[in-house]
């Protein structure tokens, strides 16, 4: 089972994602569990670089809508500077406004499951977009 940490951008949609696992039939396979940043032991205001490092150290997939590069510790800057061939990719929701749409959310879950199933081949890729 892979743990997917929902960052602050998408943590409010946890129940929707969990429901989409059920509605798509993936829940029965126990491939994914969702946690929040706080459940991972981090403060909600932890800088992106430290969030990324925590994910790497604990082999967590980070699901985010964050694409910014507005400071030296931003997620995008961290990916550019610290990603190596063994790094777990970051999963970025392509259109976070559409998470509330059931069809889109199910496509996100299918995409996320494909990433989980192919994770060893995606190490070092930096960022994977969902869907």
Image: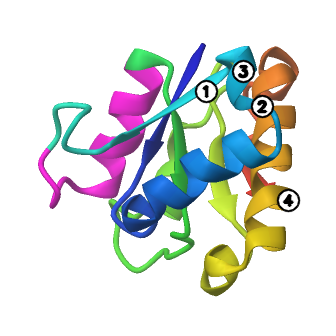
Which marked residue is nearer to the observer: mark 1 or mark 3? 3
Residue hosting label 3: 28
Circles 1 and 2: CB distance less than 8 Å? yes
Find residue 68 and report its horizontal and vertical position in percent. Answer: 50, 76
Start-end of magenta stretch: 43-57
Q: Tag on residue 32?
A: 1
Kindly identify the residue that appears in the image at 38 percent across and 59 percent down: 11
Q: Tag on residue 7?
A: none
With 44 as the anchor, is 28 left or right in this view? right
Element type at mark 2: loop
Taking the view exactly as shown, the residue that stands out farthest to the bottom is 97
Pointer 1 or 2: first along the chain: 2
Which marked residue is nearer to the observer: mark 4 or mark 3? 3
Find residue 31 and report its horizontal and vertical position in percent. Answer: 68, 20
Q: CA distance from mark 4 to mark 2?
A: 12 Å
Circles 3 and 2: CB distance less than 8 Å? yes
Q: Residues within 10 Å of mark 3 (few under 14, many from 20)?
A: few
> Taking the image as drawn, is residue 126 in sight?
no
Which marked residue is nearer to the observer: mark 4 or mark 2? 2
Q: Tag on residue 26?
A: 2
Pointer 4 or 1: first along the chain: 1
Name the residue nearer the viewer: 30 or 59: 30
Query: Which picture quadrant has residue 35?
Result: top left
Name the residue nearer the viewer: 68 or 36: 36
Majority secondary structure of the magenta segment?
Answer: helix
Residue 75: say if magenta. no
Residue hosting label 4: 107
Q: In the figure, 60 relative to 64: above or below?
A: above
Q: CA distance from mark 1 to mark 3?
A: 10 Å
């Amino acid at each position: 089972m892979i743990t997917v940490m929902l960052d602050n951008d998408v943590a409010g949609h946890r129940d929707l994602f969990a429901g989409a696992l059920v509605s798509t039939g993936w829940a029965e396979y126990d491939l994914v569990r969702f946690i929040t940043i706080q459940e991972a032991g981090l403060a909600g205001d932890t800088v992106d670089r430290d969030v990324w490092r925590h994910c790497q150290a604990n082999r967590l997939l980070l699901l985010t809508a964050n694409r910014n590069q507005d400071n030296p510790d931003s997620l995008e800057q961290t990916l550019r500077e610290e990603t190596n061939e063994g790094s777990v990719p970051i999963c970025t929701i392509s259109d976070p406004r559409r998470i509330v749409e059931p069809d889109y959310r199910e496509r996100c879950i299918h995409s996320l499951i494909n990433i989980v199933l192919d994770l060893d081949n995606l190490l070092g890729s930096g960022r994977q977009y969902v869907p």
